[in-house]
Amino acid sequence: MTATTMQTRSVDSRDLPDDEQYPVWRILAIWAATALPMGLGLWWVMPTFIAPRMEVPALGWLLLATVGLVWQAVLALLILRREVRPFTWENLKRRLWLDKPRSPRTGRASWHLLWWAVGAAVVWAGIAALGLVDPLNDALVHSFPALAPPDYALIENLATPELVGQWWIMGVVLVLIVCNYLIGEELIFRGILLPKMRGAFGRWDVIANGILFSWYHVHLIWEVPGMMFTDWIYAYLTKRYRSYWVGALFHGIDGVFLLIVFPLALAGVIQS
């Protein structure tokens, strides 16, 4: 009786019920469907088929990574079409936590709580700028040199004279941003997976989501050690406020950097 009472108290009113939770195998299957295409793209498709045939291989990786993120958006739609019946906005809001952020202390829902995501993003940017997790990443690459980033995977290699004036690339970048931070990668991990991981991981669902998200980045494997210490923040913010928009905003602020850097590179202002 006590265990049942404790379990009931730990479930928020926005949480999906136990009978809708995912088993571990389904969580891992969705993870694999997102991670493996990206990993194979970087480590096999690029060096075997694309990099040897392109003047600017980094552009090939930008295009291939965008295709991978578009696939994730398609995958998210397929999963939701299968699970959400009828396929209405109200049912999608319930399934994906698309409501306003709600304060865990007062219970009040307000869009103003999104500022917590902005504040967290500033702190995260400071951690990145100070390089606090870089020693972890450096240790991995030092121990396993084969895991060092290929030249075509470095964003600075897109700032080349060959791409100056190629403004169509901004269209690719916009697709990448939307599919990365809104309807693809983020939607799968914090919208589709997180609300259904409590059944398999209990109160550790946030940590499990962070671990899965960090190891999804096999296409950025040289950064995974650092991600293991930081990527739980996305899930923590989403679950704390029971709102997809908090985690999506925190994640999506990265896109501001892309919207600044790419126009400068295409205009020839910055060059590698």
Image (cartoon, grey):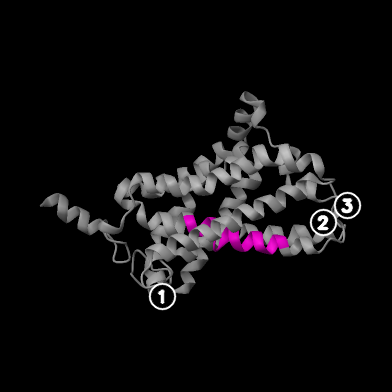
Residue 73's quadrant in the figure? Answer: bottom right
Instruction: Identify residue for label 2.
Output: 265
Label 1: which residue?
Answer: 88
- Identify the residue shown where x is 66% and y is 28%: 146
Q: In which quarter of the image is residue 222?
A: top right
Q: Which of marks 2 and 1 is nearer the N terminus?
A: 1
Q: Depth-wise, is mark 2 or mark 1 nearer the camera? A: 1
Query: How far across and how far down the image is residue 16, in percent?
Result: 31, 62
Whether tag 2 and tag 3 are in contact, CB under 8 A, the answer is no
Query: Which region of the structure is painted magenta?
Result: 172-188
For residue 226, which quarter of the picture?
top right
Q: Does the magenta stretch include residue 181?
A: yes
Task: State the image coordinates of residue 49 (x, y, percent, origin top left).
Answer: 73, 41
Viewer-nearest residue: 223 or 180: 180
Name the residue at 37% across, 73% down.
86
Q: What's the amino acid at mark 2? A: Ala
Asked which secondary structure carries label 1, the reply is loop
The kind of residue tagged 3 is: Glu
Dot 1, how many residues are within 10 Å of its Cα: few (below 14), some (14-19), or many (20+)? Answer: few
| Number of numbered markers | 3
User: Which amino acid type corresponds to the residue marked 1 in the rendered image?
Assistant: Thr
Residue density around tag 2, few if under 14, some if 14–19, many if 20 or more, within 10 Å: many
Specify whether 198 is left or right of 180.
left
- From the viewer's perspective, is residue 241 above or below residue 60? below
In the rendered structure, find residue 162 and report the number of the disc placed on it. 3
Callout 3 secondary element: helix
Q: How far apart are marks 1 and 3 (CA)?
A: 46 Å
Image position, residue 112 (x, y; %): 48, 72
